[in-house]
Image (cartoon, rainbow, N blue to C red):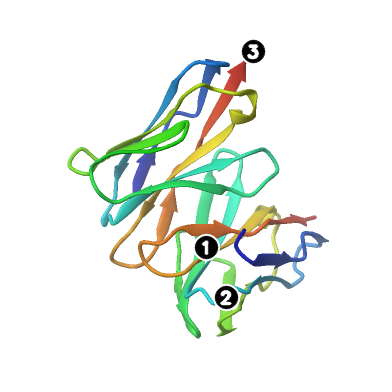
Amino acid sequence: DAGITQSPRHKVTETGTPVTLRCHQTENHRYMYWYRQDPGHGLRLIHYSYGVKDTDKGEVSDGYSVSRSKTEDFLLTLESATSSQTSVYFCAIRRDRADEQYFGPGTRLTVT
Amino acid sequence: GQNIDQPTEMTATEGAIVQINCTYQTSGFNGLFWYQQHAGEAPTFLSYNVLDGLEEKGRFSSFLSRSKGYSYLLLKELQMKDSASYLCAVDMNRDDKIIFGKGTRLHILP
C-alpha cells in the first residue's frame, strides 16, 4: 500500500470554527489531491497540488484553502466551517502524470 | 463542463458476469480510471486505460473507446466480496485534474 496517512481520522466541530486536515505521504509523489465524498454526489475534487507551493482549484473549492510547503504534506483548511462541509474527506497521491492515484483512509468531519 | 455518467445501482448474482458502463464528455482526456470502494473504506485502484481496447486483470477487465467517450468494467465469476461501489474517473490531460463520476453501487445476490 502507498504510504499515505490522514489526520485526524474523525472530527466534530462547531459552525464558524477553523479546521485543518492534514495529508502526509512517504512516497515522494509529485501530485496530491483533496476530495470530498457525499451521498448522491460521489467524489468531488476540492483542490490539488502539482508540486511544492503549486496548487490549483478543483470543482468545489469555495470555502476551502490549501497549502503545500513541503513534498510530503498537503493541508486542507476550512477557514470558518459550515454544516454543508460535513463530509468524508479523502486525500490522494500520484507519482506523476499517467500514473495510478492512491487514496488515504479518509477523515470524517462533522460540523454541528 | 465535465460530464461523467454511470448507472447508480446494479444487481447481479454470485458466479455471474456483470458489465458496468461509463460514458464521459470532458474538455480534456488522457485516460480513464476504475476504482472499487467498499462501504466505509477508501477507493482502491482497479485499472487505468489510456489506449482503446480491452485490458484484462484476472476476474476484472476494463474497456475503453476514446472516439465514443465510453468505457466499461467487466467483472466475471462474481463473488459476494465484489459487493461495493465502482467509480469511473477521467484523467484530464490539460490541467492534471482527475474527475469522478458518481459511482455505481453493485449488489451481489447469493
Q: Secondary structure at mark 1?
A: strand
In the visual, does B9 lie left or right of B88? Answer: right
Q: Is residue B1 something one can see in this rendering?
A: no
> How far from the left and from the top, in percent, is residue B64?
28, 40
Residue that appears at 53% across and 49% down? A43
**Local secondary structure at mark 3:** loop
Q: Give the vertical position of B101 relative to B11 (above or below).
A: below
**Residue in the picture at 35% in, 62% down:** A98
Please state which of the two labelled residues, at mark 1 or mark 3, is closer to the viewer: 3
**Image coordinates for residue B77, horizontal then vertical, percent:** 51, 21
Q: Which residue appears farthest toward the front when viewing the image?
A: B58
- Mark 2 lies on residue: A66
In percent of width and height, residue A60 lies at 50, 59
Question: What is the distance, in whole Å, between disc 1 and disc 2 at their CAs?
Answer: 9 Å
Measured in 3D between alpha carbons, the distance from the residue under mark 3 to the one under mark 2, in whole angstroms, is 46 Å
Say whether residue B38 is left or right of residue A48. right
* Residue A94, above or below B108: below
Q: Provide the chain ID for the residue under circle 2.
A: A
Q: Looking at numbered disc 3 in the image, what kind of residue is underneath it?
A: Pro
Residue B40 in which image quadrant: top right
- Chain bearing mark 3: B
Q: Secondary structure at mark 2?
A: strand
From the image, which quarter does the N terminus of chain A lie in?
Answer: bottom right
Q: Nearer the viewer, mark 3 or mark 2?
A: 3
Q: Quadrant of the C terminus of chain A?
A: bottom right
- The answer for how far apart the CA atoms under marks 1 and 3 are is 39 Å
In the rendered image, residues at marks 1 and 3 fall on the same chain? no
How many neighbours does mark 2 have within 10 angstroms: few (below 14), some (14-19), or many (20 or more)? many
Residue to which mark 1 is pinned? A46
The answer to whether the residue labelled 1 contacts the one labelled 2, judged by CB atoms less than 8 Å apart, is yes
- To which residue does mark 3 refer? B110
Residue A24 placement (x, y as % from top left): 65, 73
